[in-house]
Amino acid sequence: MKRIIRGIKRILSEEAYCSNCDRFVKVDVKVKTYGNRRIEIKKCSICGRVIEEREYYTEI
C-alpha cells in the first residue's frame, strides 16, 4: 500500500530547481508531524538533496 501511495505522489509531485543537478526536477515531499508542528521537507528525486524545508504550526 505504501508503494502505491509513493508512486501516486511521485506522479503528482511538483517541480523545483535543484542547484546540485543544475535543472528543474521533480521533488519528493515528506511531511513530519510533531504535536502541533508540521515540517514539510522537499527533496530532489534524482540526487536526494534537500531543496526546501518549511515549518508550520497548526491549531489542535
Image: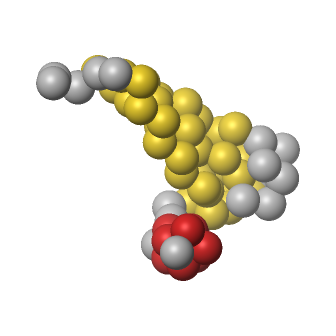
Q: Quadrant of residue 6?
A: bottom right
Q: Is residue 19 visible?
A: no
**Rendered image coloring scheme:** secondary structure
Q: Horizontal placement of 16 versus 57: left or right? A: right
Please, is residue 49 above or below residue 16 in the view? above
Q: How many marks?
A: 0
Q: Identify the residue shown where x is 50% and y is 61%.
A: 14
Q: Residue furthest left?
A: 60
Q: Identify the residue shown where x is 66% and y is 47%.
A: 43
Q: Identify the residue shown where x is 80% and y is 60%.
A: 46
Q: Identify the residue shown where x is 52% and y is 75%.
A: 1
Q: Horizontal placement of 41 versus 48: left or right? A: left
Of residues 5 and 15, the one nearer the viewer is 5
Q: Residue furthest front?
A: 1
x and y percent of residue 44 in the render? 71, 52
Q: Horizontal placement of 52 versus 55: left or right? A: right
Of residues 44 and 23, the one nearer the viewer is 44
Of residues 7 and 19, the one nearer the viewer is 7
x and y percent of residue 28 in the render? 60, 56
Q: Is residue 8 visible?
A: yes
Q: Horizontal placement of 43 versus 48: left or right? A: left
Please, is residue 45 above or below residue 37 in the view? below
Q: Is the C terminus in the top left, top right, bottom left or bottom right quadrant?
A: top left
x and y percent of residue 35 in the render? 34, 22
x and y percent of residue 26 in the render? 63, 63
Please, is residue 30 above or below residue 2 in the view? above
